Amino acid sequence: MAESRQVNDLISIERQGDIALICIDNPPVNATGQQVREGLQKAVEQLNAEGGAKVIAIYAAGRTFVAGADIKEFGKPPQPPALPDVFNIIEDSEIPVTSVMHGTALGGGFELGLATHARIGIEGLRVGLPEINLGLLPGAGGTQRVPRLAGIPMALDMALSGRMVPAQEALEKGLIDRLEAGDPRDVAIAAAQDVLDGKLQTRRTCDLDTPKDDAALEETATMLRKKQPHMFSPHKIVEAVRASYLPRTEGMAIERQAFVDSMDTPQRAGMIHAFFGERAVSGIPEAKGDTRPLDRIGVIGGGTMGSGIATSCLLAGIPVTLVEVAQDGLDRGVATITKNIDGAVSRGKLAADKRDAVLGMLTPTLAMEELARVDLVIEAVFEKMDVKRDIFGKLDGICKQGAVLASNTSYLDINEIAACTSRPQDVLGLHFFSPAHVMRLLEIVQGEKTAADVLATGFALAKKLKKVGVLAQVCDGFIGNRILAHYSKAASYLVLDGASPQQVDDALEGFGFAMGPHKVGDLAGLDIGWMTRKRKADTRDPNERYAGDVADRICENGWFGRKTGKGYYVYEGGAPVPNPEVATIIDTVRTEKGITPREFTDQEIIDRYMTAMISEAARVVEDGTAKRPVDVDMVFLFGYGFPRFRGGPLHYADTIGAAELVERIKTYAKEDPHYWQVPPILEKMAQDGTKFADLN
Ligand code: 3HC
């Protein structure tokens, strides 16, 4: 006789003869919040105490198995029972327990599966230990049970990369016992029956010994000391995995301590801010509501940006019409897109057998009239207002009514562009970041007249392209490039006043940036900034200290960075080495300007650079260019290589505090009162003790 009962709101037990099913139903992702933990513990304890059931099968309702611990609880006082204790109770159950996992089983979700005595995956399942992306490590047995089942290298790989492991691989590695098709509940009943019939073996994972592999542990520990010296949790992961040699109680205690210690770090707070921030940027009313169709997209311009944008759309399954003015440009665009798609195949982002179909969705043409059939056009041509005005005037005559007209401009006035059409309500900015098929940021720029459904369509496109769409208002450079234009001067002033480009880069790489600003400049091409400085030469504020002397002279030599083999660094195959001729240029400029160079510590470099960044970021929030501080943070994480573990410039600002930042600006202002000005919003925050987080 079948009978069902709720253990609590989120956990239920269903009895079918000798079989007991435990169902977790905690939408949207079945996270193991306090009630789930308590319910699971009670369910297993009750079933063991009652007797009757001879096998237990755990499954979850909804779109996915369990996405791990409830991240919203992190940073708050822990509520018992603790997840590892619940899982040990499951592992210790006298009645054998199987689990059936579908969708994604991540972190604590996968650890739940690992604690059961047999695991079935439903086709399409992916398992993973993504805690590292939150500044943490698996804290409910993941570091203890994965090595026992799949060996130390696999445990290190999963816990250090956070990658999602496809079901087939999980099966081959012994992380799951079977892969089946079907509804989780049906599969759970069948699996339980198989246990009863002796067709599915059960065993306690912690009864197994971890196969010894000291070499893998040593090699990884050495690599991490070299490559990630400033990170906390990766080193703890190695320690915890090593502890899986020990009996469960001791190993779990080491893992637990490492988890608790990681929880206390600012890195954990920064990364969790990043996790929720990524989702919060599209949680605004402007991103919601009716949208327009996105069945075919037009891209104008086959250069690096246009080709990257087209690639991104094709990879998302959206057919693209690519327009160029001349055949050679069009051929180059098609070649770049083909190279990008082939790259996606070799990186495992696209299945090889889909390559031709994806490329088949591309229609290259010299006829702009072909854009009559597209739903959305993205113009990605040379950054000149005259050119854009001409294109948008033509689009107005060609595109169907209701088509969305977007410009990928990185700083030009969207309102002026929109005014060249009879339909400014259909125009917006969609600012991609290079390489556009890789970088996840999309600034969605709202013009004065942009219609609500056009803006929402921008967000819908971001979602389809798996990008992080952030709303920005019109200004020179929008959110990211405007802030960049300001703080990059701080790096130049540091060099003028005594630091070397390499010292600045090293200090900021030590802070966590993947590359320092001079290396980034060399990579992007120093000619870009040179052109911008020339463009703005006439309108430059005479009171502002000029920051471009050194870079201008480097460019005058034809050294534009990597692409010319020389810039701030010399590129001759191996690692870049500082360009000795740049040191001479710097000396000359200092002498001409009567600057006596002085020493800067790495900390001073970081403080000045970050304070400059925060100052302009604060102004961007103050004048409404960005809606909230979190929007600025996500722009920097997803578009500018800002270290994720620091959460973004304004999250980082909160860790310093407005009062300290104001103090710093006032001190620096003694040297340069024009550049260093306290943004009123920061002054106010310093007075009333508020944080940027309060404005989100
Ligand atoms: N805790 C709390 N909320 C969570 C959550 C979690 N673990 N995972 C997702 N959510 C929330 C999201 O914030 C989002 O909320 P919103 O609708 O209010 O914005 C909602 O659930 C849906 O999430 P997504 O928009 O991300 O949905 P997707 O379908 O795109 O992705 C997912 C689903 C792949 C499960 C993705 O949400 C994900 O990667 N989640 C995080 C997984 C993770 O990091 N787990 C480890 C947690 S730490 C841990 O387990 C510690 C343990 O070892 C002790």
Image: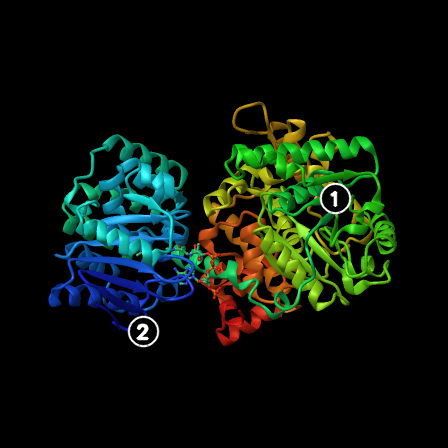
Asked which quadrant contains residue 594, the reply is top right
Mark 2 to mark 1 CA distance (whole Å): 51 Å
Categorize mark 2 by other alpha carbons within 10 Å: few (<14), some (14-19), many (20+): few
Can you identify the residue that label 2 sits on?
Answer: 9
**Circle 2: element type:** loop
For the residue pair 32 and 44, the one nearer the viewer reads as: 44
For the residue pair 229 and 608, the one nearer the viewer reads as: 229
Q: Residue at x 83, y 45 (%)?
A: 368
For the residue pair 379 and 1, the one nearer the viewer reads as: 1
Q: Within the displayed image, which quadrant is ligand 1 positioned in?
A: bottom left
The numbered mark at residue 321 is 1
As shown in the figure, which amino acid type bears the numbered disc 1? Thr
Q: Residue 439: x percent and y percent?
A: 58, 46
Asked which quadrant contains residue 289, the reply is bottom right
For ligand 1, tell me if the residue under mark 2 lies within 8 Å.
no
Q: Quadrant of the N terminus?
A: bottom left
Residue 239 left/right relative to 594: left
- Against 516, is 139 above or below? below
Q: Residue at x 45, y 62 (%)?
A: 655
For the residue pair 234 and 439, the one nearer the viewer reads as: 439
Residue 293 left/right relative to 173: right
- Against 134, is 659 above or below? below
